Image (spheres, rainbow, N blue to C red):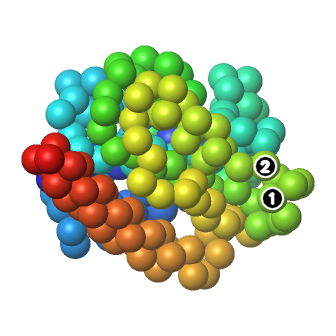
Amino acid sequence: MRAVVVYESLFGNTHEVASAIGDGVAEVMAVTVLSVSDATPALVEGVDLVVVGGPTHVHGMSLAPTRDQAQKMAADSGGELHLDENASGIGVREWLERLPASDAMAAAFDTRINVPRVLSGAASGRIDHALRRRGLRAVSTPMSFLVNTSNQLESSELARARAWGIDVAHDAMSTDAADTTAARR
């Protein structure tokens, strides 16, 4: 089986989480981790598992204006905020709009501020919904990874992301096995 982890990251937190998820998935199956800018349809075509994540902005996925605002915040921060190397370009919302229909398995994640979800929202639910609209089959509940008010990942989040990646990959393997058994009947 093959997997791809696709992420949008502005300040690097979601990139780090995506890499940790990829490390976890790699314990179970072959995986490639790509930014939305690099994840062309050809690179995603034919994979068995697509894991997609992005930062939470205004209770959901980022928009061009919220990405522009983040870039302005970084420019005005006096060097305290640094943009991810892949911060320019399209966001996960636009990438999902271009994603061709597929029957691959999928999982969604986000990064969000460490406050009650009712206050922050979570992009992962919207990502999950967009994946399902394109025919992908969710193998996991959408997951949030937390960032503190200083825009740093909480201390345990990378370990949690790696463990979640392992779980998602095992869930995909189990789903694949069940699908194969059902097809034989």
Mark seen at residue 121: 2
Q: Residue at x 57, y 54 (%)?
A: 142
Left or right: 173, with 162 as reference point: left
Residue 58 pos. (x, y %): 80, 39
Disc 2 versus disc 1: distance between alpha carbons? 5 Å
Q: Residue at x 71, y 49 (%)?
A: 122
Residue 72 pos. (x, y %): 73, 35
Residue 3 pos. (x, y %): 25, 50
Q: Residue at x 36, y 21 (%)?
A: 101
> Residue reaching furthest left?
184
At numbered mark 2, what does the secondary structure look like: helix, strand or loop?
A: loop
Does any portion of residue 68 appear in the rendered image? Answer: no
Query: Within the image, what quadrant is residue 52 found in?
Result: top left
Residue 148 pos. (x, y %): 74, 69
Give 73 or 157, whichever is nearer the viewer: 157
At numbered mark 1, what does the secondary structure look like: helix, strand or loop?
A: helix
Amino acid of disc 1: Arg
Does any portion of residue 55 appear in the rendered image? Answer: yes
Give 78 or 19, whichever is nearer the viewer: 19
> Residue reaching furthest front?
185
Mark seen at residue 30: none
Query: Within the image, what quadrant is residue 19 found in?
Result: bottom left
The answer to whether residue 24 is above or below residue 69 is below
Neighbours of disc 2 within 10 Å: few (<14), some (14-19), many (20+): some
Amino acid of disc 2: Gly
Left or right: 37, with 54 as reference point: left
Give 145 or 131, whichever is nearer the viewer: 131
Looking at the image, do the residues carrying marks 2 and 1 touch, with CB atoms under 8 Å apart?
yes
Q: Residue at x 22, y 29 (%)?
A: 45
Q: Which residue is mark 1?
A: 117
